[in-house]
Amino acid sequence: MRRDFSVFCLGKVNEKVDLFILSRRGLSELKNMTYFVIGVSGVTCGGKTTLTKLLQRSFPWARVIHQDKYFYPEDYPGHLRVPEMNEHINFDRWSALDMEQMEKDVHKILHTPPTINGLRTKNEEIPPNFAEGLELLRNLKDIDFDTSKYSHIPIIIIEGFIMFESEDLYEKCDMRLFLTLDEETCRHRRSLRVFDPPDGEGYFEHCIWPEYQRHFKHHIKHRPAVQVLSGKTHIGNLWKDAVSLITNKMEEKFHYKINKAEGHF
């Protein structure tokens, strides 16, 4: 698996969240609710993983699926190799990932009643906290947005750099977020990261940026349902904007059930 060892980390997501006291009937309704699916995608080093962790902080009952988990091993015969880079593997294409398995895993979750822990969906996969990385998020204050009234809504966050190339995953998402960067900023941020295996000289020019441009042109640019956000926006503001977009969409989808949970009919 190709892994970025300098990814930002938050430590444990918040353990405390105000929960609704539901009757047996309410608990039954919770188990039968459909998931709200959030897709977080974008250019490399644009802030996808950071934003995903912050969304976990706002919605600590959410389940998370990371596309990076589905990279084929280096000896996989189907890898596309780059002649100009001494046959280096192109990890920035669809062919580098077992997307069929990822789609199956998401499908399985969506067709299984939410796992309840207390009255929360169980977060079975918390991103690993690598020892290295910047301390940017440790001192980031929580946004003034109480998400507890949504805690009866099962949430899945799917994070990945080309996840929207999957029509299946694209259609399953209720909210689609895509982070962008200009070429210079992307190149600089990428140079500060450590990958295994390493990028190699020329990888950005031959693979990363051309593949990003292709992906944006064919899978993002002409899709109005994708919320395109700048990865250069201050992370606190980006977090706030994302939570606002998500909660507004949840209000549209679950308006009756949200009001009912609050005691309004």
Image: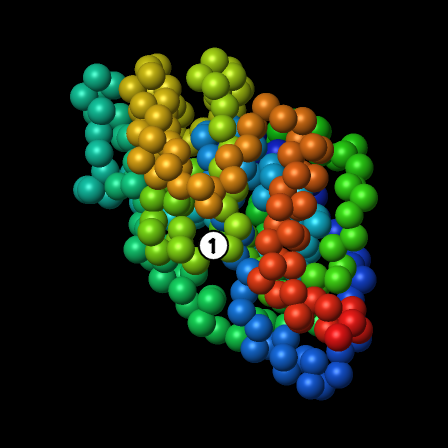
Q: In percent of the image, x 27 and y 30: which residue is there?
A: 89
Q: Is residue 62 visible?
A: no
Q: Within the image, what quadrant is residue 240 found in?
A: top right
Q: In percent of the image, x 22 and y 34: which residue is there?
A: 80
Task: Report whether 255 appears left or right of 171.
Answer: right
User: Where does the image place residue 65, in percent across and percent down from the top left?
Assistant: 49, 53
Q: Is residue 67 visible?
A: yes
The residue beneath circle 1 is 173
Task: Report whether 59 appears left or right of 170.
Answer: right
Q: Residues within 10 Å of mark 1 (few under 14, many from 20)?
A: many
User: Where does the image place residue 199, in percent across and percent down from the top left?
Assistant: 38, 23
Q: Nearer the viewer, residue 221 or 230?
A: 221
Q: Where's the C terminus, which quadrant? A: bottom right
Q: Nearer the viewer, residue 100 or 238?
A: 238
User: Where does the image place residue 77, in percent across and percent down from the top left?
Assistant: 19, 42
Vertical position of residue 105 compared to residue 196: above or below: below
Q: Within the image, what quadrant is residue 256 found in?
A: bottom right
User: Where does the image place residue 154, in percent across and percent down from the top left?
Assistant: 60, 65
